[in-house]
Image (spheres, rainbow, N blue to C red):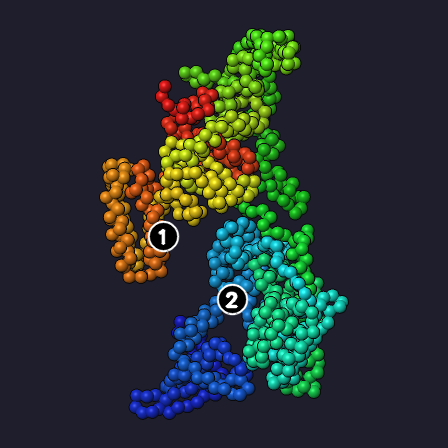
Amino acid sequence: MVAQTVDDRTGHRFESRLDAVEHIPSAGRGSPAQAVPVRFHFLNKPGRDESLLLGFDALALTGKGRCTSTHGKLVYGDDYAVKKVRIAELAGEVRRRIGQMAVLLSGTASPELVLNRHCAECGFQRHCRQKAVEQDSLSLLAGMGERERQRLRGKGIFTVTQLSHTFQPRRKPRWLQGRAEKYHHALKALAIRERKIHLVGRPELKIEGTPVYLDVEGLPDRDCYYLIGLRIGSGAAARQHSLWADTDRAEEKIWREFLAVLNTVERPVLIHYGSYETSFLKRMRARHGEPEPGSPAAGAMESALNLVSVIFARIYFPTFSNGLKEIAQYLGFSWSVPEASGVQSVVWRETWSRAPASSERERRNLIAYNADDCAALEVVTQRILDLAATLPPDVVDAAGLKRENPYGFKRNRFFFPELATINQAAYWDYQREKVYVKSDRRLRRALIKVPAGSIRDVPVNRRVQCAAPTQCPHCGLSSLRKYDRASRTVYDLKFTRGGLRRWVVHYHYHRHECRHCGRVFRPPAAGLPDGKFGPALMAYAVYQNIELRLSQEMIDRSLDELFGLPLAQGSASRFKIKAAQVYAATYELLLRRLRHGGLLHVDETKVSVAGCQGCVWVFASLDTVAYVYTQNRESEWLRDFLKNFQGVLVTDFYSGYDALECPKQRCLIHFLRDLNDDLYKHPYDEELKRVGRDFADLVRPMIATVERRGLKVRFLKKHRRAVDRFYRRLDLAPPGSAVLKKYRERFARERGELFTFLHHDGVPWNNNNAEHAIKAFALLRQVINGVTSEKGLREYLVLLSVCETCKYQGVKFLDFLRSGEQDIHRFATPR
């Protein structure tokens, strides 16, 4: 029987060929006759697709006549079981799918090619897969769902190759080390593009005993198993066992044979691939009995190893899926029956069961396919064992991959030398010096290079003859003699009331030798530094680098262009290194003052050092700032750093501060921002809005008191009762939503640290001191730009600590550098 239905939006007709229709006459007036569609299905386990087809039959029937269909019947399986399906529950989805098909039929373009789980049953599988490979379709990646593909398409990523360029290696934080590794589709795509195995960490696989490779064949719709394959041992000495069951009743027989084989193996280690064998072991033990306790078979089942769990999210083979057949073929293994597959094995078994005598070829194919699966499992296992032992040169460790930025400035690599030549001709300097200069006279004059001067050509402003020493600076005796004549030119800057000028001094002196101790020394002279550059020049360069945030290359250029000092490349860097050494003692003094103070603000931010992620911590009080670099964000070192700190610590809500044993004031601004964000995300959560308003009404009077009276406990302690009332009301409130529950727990957990400023004088309710200092480092970080070394960053932090402390104390950083003073607090104290 044929029935038709029409899509209302497009007018397309859809036809259903019904297997049977059961007519139920009308029960009386007002009760129309019913037509019950009947569909036959050969499998013993019908799925949702069969129910949807039955719903489509019902929709077609109701459109043909005046009868209705409230339900349908599905006759399925070997025993012709009947399943009654309610049509009303399927009508919405059936109409939605009809609408989707109608839209596809109305369009002029072909629908998007998407490989799915039904491809294995389709006769066009090979054609569609070939087309998907040509398109480099994302649906080739077996583990990627439709929602993930839609998300990537929204970002403009349509192919596997495009996806491969999006992988960014990230170091897993310590507090996430115990969690399961996340699967990265982008890394899988990268492995396919590079045709290399990629690892996330080192594979953890160790076989202590005799490996037993297990593969099972069964009929999923009957929940029965007919072939158990066992490959015992490895290499040429491996033994293959194929345990065959002619009927479903023989399943228990092959189970007993399986246990008997395992019990003959010394220390068997059962290895299988996928969850199908896991379900097999569980079901067979429940159906036919457990192995004898303490036997080798019992031990092997308790510690059975699913190789997929070792591969997943850790080993990325350059294959579109993690299927055994794809991976083994990549490793060089081939099946004796090329067309063998899981679906084909079901066809072979059904063919053999109907005519065993004439289908011996199908039985041999099944046994060969099962034995090949066991051998392929051995090949994959051995490869993983090799990867766990050593890392071959053709295998890539994902942790060592360089983070790629397709939009950054970098030198391009070209496949053909001719492309590199064409690209070279487009450089700005090349075009000016080789192309435009031939047609522009003014440009030709501008490009005439003036020979660079030498710093030795700079005229001298003053000459100084150093007086002879009267005694040896080492032993204190006056028995001296002239050793040789020497001179030194010192290049410096001179600060005047109206500006800054170059100042060059030439020193003449005799070196003397002590007749008593034999030491050779130069005479002490005012203004004669250890090197050839004066302190004012170095102070000016460090000031521009740290406070004005000019790059060292720009500083070198400006000293040449403004003062006529053609310094060697990297001079500003050397000034920075020397200044960091000079002020190392000042930096340690700042840290000591902070640790022994009564109030300390702490915050942290990330920084890139030579391509690796590190962390910079800032410690601040009302008049002192210091920065500390660590290689990660872990907070264990803080316990030693602040073990003698007796004051109040002002922090954000990072859990790393929880272990510090000192009073803490959590930043209320951070808390208010989190609460405000969730209020916008849940605008109809009335209970959350009530808690948010109550918290705002609690804190607002406190801020008003602080603005009027300052951070004094005698004025702030009156608000403690309001805090108690707020918490009592919060405890009596109904449970509410999940987000409200989160805030109730957070309020309870942080109660002792949200309002510490009500109990201590001079403690602010926010962490603005540290955040302001973090901004200063963030601006300097743009100058550093991730190219500095760890040593260079620590030097930057020493000088930045001195610079910011000068600001907090109200003195000029440049004045402090010029003064030669080491103690900022003493320099800032009025004399």
Indicate left or right for 754 with 532 as reference.
left
Q: Position of residue 129 (x, y in %)?
A: 60, 66
Q: At label 2, which amino acid type do we have?
A: Pro
Question: Across the whole image, how many numbered discs are drawn on residues?
Answer: 2
- Residue visible at 56% across and 19% down? 530
Residue 771 position (above or below residue 506): below
- Residue visible at 65% across and 10% down? 515
Callout 1–callout 2 Cβ contact below 8 Å = no
Q: At label 1, which amino acid type do we have?
A: Arg
Q: Nearer the viewer, residue 525 or 432?
A: 525
Q: Position of residue 532 (x, y in %)?
A: 57, 19
- Residue visible at 62% across and 70% down? 299
Q: Quadrant of residue 763?
A: top left
Task: Say which mark, if any, is on residue 103.
Answer: none
Answer yes or no: is residue 270 visible.
yes
Q: Nearer the viewer, residue 802 or 200?
A: 802
Q: Position of residue 801 (x, y in %)?
A: 45, 32
Answer few, some or many: residues within 10 Å of disc 2's Cα (few below 14, many 20 plus, some between 14 and 19). few
User: If you read the primary sequence from the N terminus, does the residue marked by circle 1 or circle 2 appear first?
Assistant: 2
Answer few, some or many: residues within 10 Å of disc 1's Cα (few below 14, many 20 plus, some between 14 and 19). few
- Residue visible at 61% across and 79% down? 225
Q: Nearer the viewer, residue 485 or 684?
A: 485
Q: Position of residue 810 (x, y in %)?
A: 37, 27
Label 2: which residue?
111
Label 1: which residue?
749
Seen as rendered, the residue at the extreme right is 236
What is the CA distance from the residue labelled 1 to the residue labelled 2? 55 Å
Residue 190 position (above or below residue 664): below
Q: Quadrant of residue 486?
A: top right
Q: Nearer the viewer, residue 359 or 12?
A: 359
Element class at badge 2: loop
